[in-house]
Amino acid sequence: MPKKPLTQTTQEELNEEVLAGMNAQKTDLDKLWYYLNTYSLYSTVLTAEEMMKDPSAPPKREDYKSDEEYQRELEAHNETVLNDHLTDDEKESLQMPADRDSRKKLSEATDVLEEELKEKVLPAGTLAERLKSFKLLGILKAKIALDCGRDYEAKLLSLPEDAQNREDKAFYLHMKDIHSRTLKLSTSYKDLENKFVMDNGDFPSEIMKESPIPDVASIKKMTMGKFLDSNFVEPAEQDFLFQNAAAEGLKCSRKTSVFEFYKKRLEADEQKRKQQNPGYQVREITDAEVYEKAKERYISDAIRGQMKFGSDSVREGLSEYEKKLFDQGMNAITVKDYKPPKPIRDWVKTTGDEILRERRLNNLNDTYGYFGKEVDQRKPFKLESDRALKKAYGKDLDKDASAYDKFIAQHIGARAILDPPGKRREHLALVMAANAVQSAKNGAIDEKLVKNIAKEYLTRDGFRKMSDYEVSTALLTKEKALAAQQKVLTKTFGVPKEEQAEYIRKMKALSEAMVPAEGQSAKYQAMKKSVDAIAKLDPKDPKTGEKLMLENGKLLGNLQTYTKGKKSKRFYSSSQARFDNSLDVLSVVDDHVPGMRQYADQIVKRTNEVRNVGPMDDDYVDLSEYGVKRAEWVAPEGTRAYDRKISAKADEWLKEAGFDPAKLRKESAEAGPLNLN
């Protein structure tokens, strides 16, 4: 703001100065904060202007029919006088402009900033821009909610610990302390939110084309589960929706089609009209009407869900104590038409209002000074460094945090969720990859390795099938990301419990039939070692499921490394035998590890493509022709499978010669070693 008093400042000077102040802000969040402070400054001057007016005369008893009506009007009048009018002494002590001209100048300057916001910070362009704007508003709301919670806590601590209804009294002091900076910002935020929702609360058809439900055909294919997930509707709220629908006779679940659900709802509405008016002619519901109903729900959920998600991205990073304050503040922001509860109404009249009256002048002067100072600068606020937002933006780390934790912090929380869906997936893949590498080797971060593993994560079925809702939720905190990572690992490398014993049995059989590892390449030895590790697991061990996931992950890496570059038919039989063994392993994996089938298919497809062969060619690889039986049949000398095979053939020869193999073995054992002396 210009250094001159508002009364001596021209409109052009003021507009130019506040616009320069906003443009000095580096982030969208800082620009929003600058706007809110300017708007609050205008609101404070408007308040002072109104409070300078003389109060109207109190109501007279004779003008009302009953004492009850008179008391209501008297209370309303007294509250107005308390909030909206200063005493003569207070007017003389007011340290801020309270004239109409100053208020009008600030009003116009605020309008200039609002246009800047609409154009550059909260654009009403694409669907992605709108959704990001809603999330951004939610993040800002979270900061203000925490400030409100702290103000409530300060009010609570100002009251005696043994005071009756202490929490209610503190909440009253917070909600009615309308001249405080906290409440001014809260009110300014609500005005901004209402304006933005009003301007952007109806998505035109061109915007809906970018949504998950661009047309009628899309809602006929989409399930209610995917529909609600796309808008961050939480599971508990989804269950509540389905329960309410069932109570109304509209059976619905996550698998119900969106079209079917909303058509039934509109048909039910028609039947209600018929019941209320027997002469009403029930209409046939058109597809267009069903789509409009679904669209209405989509927009409502998009606005509410995205804003809540933005707020949650901040809340998740708070301590338990701060979360308590946050929840209290969020309640204060969202409550409507607050009235003090009955138990404290007498206290309000005798004490509460007097407390507010005593502090209102100081609040007005302090609030004006605070907002004036915030607007009177051309340097970035750096709001992301605010205590309430530090962790959400990945900056609230210990000085000695590891390089991996610092890397993860850059891809988690509020910073990440503001990005488009595709970029959010990349953030999560990087977080998972960094965690995986950190678990193996801490210290200086190997970003190249992390990025390579992240690319691999992006291809995994378990990861690709995560909904945008699941990806975004996982990005709220590192803990949630790691929980999501565990789910992806389970879907990728997990073996169904009922198949674990058979999987281990087959791997043991392969371990005993494959070409021995001794003397072979390091890559083959690593692959064989992975097979051996799985073969040694105990199916009865309760931790076998976890161990299988770990070993399957290692096995995949070793299989990919070994088979890479081995596309053509092997020239030497020993080389071909080892490559065939890798296909035997892939066949068993394909049978028992659903999440790894995509990798088995990739290896086989790559081999056949490079060999340039089709199903009728000799060199064509068909995984169904490989597995335990083939490996055992061709097991080389020196393996247990080979020894068993030779033993079986010997028994077969003895039987053909008329001998009993079992009897001969028994007699040989009883005779002991042959004595040739």
Image (spheres, rainbow, N blue to C red):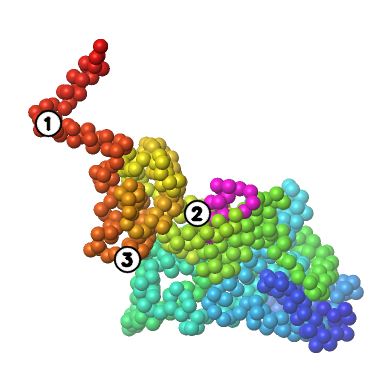
Q: Is 51 positioned to the left or the right of 33 in the image?
A: right
Is residue 175 shown left or right of residue 210? right
Relative vertical location of residue 664 with respect to residue 182 in this rendering, above or below? above
Residue 440 shown in magenta = yes
Q: Amino acid at mark 2?
A: Gln
The image shows a total of numbered marks equal to: 3
Bounds of the magenta segment: 428-445
Q: Judge by depth and name the residue closer to the eye, 541 or 167.
A: 541
Provide residue 450's location: percent of width, then percent of height: 56, 57
Q: Name the quadrant containing residue 515.
A: top left
Q: Quadrant of the N terminus?
A: bottom right
- CA separation, marks 1 and 2? 57 Å
Q: What residue is shown with label 1?
A: 655
Q: Is residue 76 visible?
A: no
What's the residue at 32%, 66% (across, down)?
612
Q: Nearer the viewer, residue 639 or 414?
A: 639
Q: Residues within 10 Å of mark 3 (few under 14, many from 20)?
A: few
**Whole-percent x, y for residue 277 in the image:** 36, 80
Q: Which mark is residue 485?
A: 2
- What separation in Å lies between label 3 and label 1 (alpha carbons)? 48 Å
* Residue for point 72% across, 75% down: 35
Alpha carbon distance from label 3 to label 2: 37 Å
Q: Please state if 492 lies on the left or on the right of 118 as rendered.
A: left
Type of amino acid at the residue the image marks with label 3: Asn
Mark 3 lies on residue: 612
Q: Tell me, yes or no, whether the two marked residues, 1 and 2, touch with CB atoms within 8 Å.
A: no
Left/right placement of residue 637 relative to residue 382 reads left
422 is higher (above) or lower (below) than 638: below
Whichever of labels 3 and 2 marks the residue nearer the N terminus, that label is 2
The residue that appears at 18% across and 35% down in the rendered structure is 649
Give the dominant element type of the magenta stretch: helix, strand or loop. helix
Q: Amino acid at mark 1?
A: Lys
